[in-house]
Image (tube, rainbow, N blue to C red):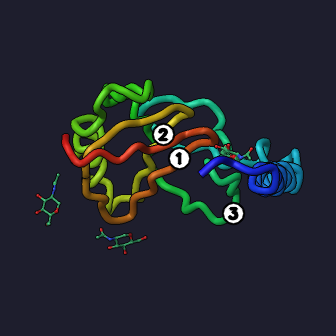
């Protein structure tokens, strides 16, 4: 079917609505949020945490150990498989389940991965612009 002007207009309207939603999510965030963000005791020193992929800044549980998937060899280029990196990370971080929990940060990028299991008292934190690409193969 050939796209009509009406359907193009509809797509455009949807895009405008979505970008407005993105914009309003961002503008709702007070600027002081970054400065009061709790400093995590981390194994790997991380910079001030980024906004989550959903612009969510609410009640992210405070975890004792915060690490980046990059510390486990992850590469967010959209083509490298990160299955082993995620599995290694969670294997490492599940040890903190009973001692303050852990958070794995996934920076901005496209992270291809097969399946991996989560663990207890664990936060998988997708920073703003991070996309997980699920793959059926490892
Ligand atoms: C909304 O934000 C997401 C995440 O940053 C982005 O991937 C998406 O393209 C944005 N949508 C629009 C319409 O800008
Ligand atoms: C998760 O943490 C809570 C304390 O915040 C603790 O009571 C609980 O046992 C932990 N769960 C596991 C499975 O370690
Ligand atoms: C995830 O958990 C399921 C069920 O316990 C198990 O069969 C599977 O092997 C686990 N996968 C990994 C990568 O640990």
Percent across and percent down for residue 56 are 68, 57
The disc placed on residue 114 is none
Instruction: Tell me the distance, in whole angstroms, between the alpha carbons under discs 1 and 3.
Output: 14 Å
Task: Using the image as rendered, state which of residue 32 and residue 127 is in the foreground.
Answer: 127
Q: Residue at x 54, y 40 (%)?
A: 130
Q: Give the quarter of the figure containing the C terminus.
A: top left
The answer to the question of whether label 2 and label 1 lie on touching residues, with beta carbons closer than 8 A, is yes
Q: Nearer the viewer, mark 1 or mark 3?
A: 1
Left or right: residue 41 compared with residue 90:
right
Q: Residues within 10 Å of mark 2 (few under 14, many from 20)?
A: many
Q: Is residue 39 above or below residue 119?
A: above
Q: CA distance from mark 2 to mark 1?
A: 5 Å
Rendering quarter of residue 51? top right
Q: Are marks 2 and 3 in contact (CB under 8 Å)?
A: no
The residue beneath circle 3 is 58
Looking at the rendering, the quadrant in which ligand 3 lies is bottom left
Residue with the mark numbered 2 = 106
Is any part of residue 4 visible from this angle? yes
Q: Earlier in the sequence, mark 1 or mark 3?
A: 3
Residue 105 relative to residue 54: left or right: left
Q: Which residue is mark 1?
A: 126
User: Tag 1 or tag 2, which sits nearer the N-term?
Assistant: 2
Q: Position of residue 127 (x, y in %)?
A: 58, 42
């Amino acid at each position: 079917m050939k796209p009509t002007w009406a359907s193009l207009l509809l797509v455009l309207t949807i895009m405008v609505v979505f970008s407005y939603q993105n914009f309003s999510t961002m503008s709702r965030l007070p600027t002081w949020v970054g400065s009061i963000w709790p400093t995590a005791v981390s194994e790997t020193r991380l910079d001030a945490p980024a906004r989550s992929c959903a612009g969510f800044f609410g009640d992210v549980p405070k975890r004792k150990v915060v690490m980046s998937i990059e510390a486990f060899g992850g590469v967010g280029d959209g083509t490298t498989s990160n299955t082993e990196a995620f599995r290694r990370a969670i294997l490492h971080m599940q040890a903190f389940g009973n001692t303050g929990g852990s958070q794995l940060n996934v920076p901005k990028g496209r992270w291809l991965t097969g399946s991996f299991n989560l663990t207890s008292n664990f936060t998988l934190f997708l920073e703003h612009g991070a996309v997980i690409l699920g793959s059926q193969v490892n």
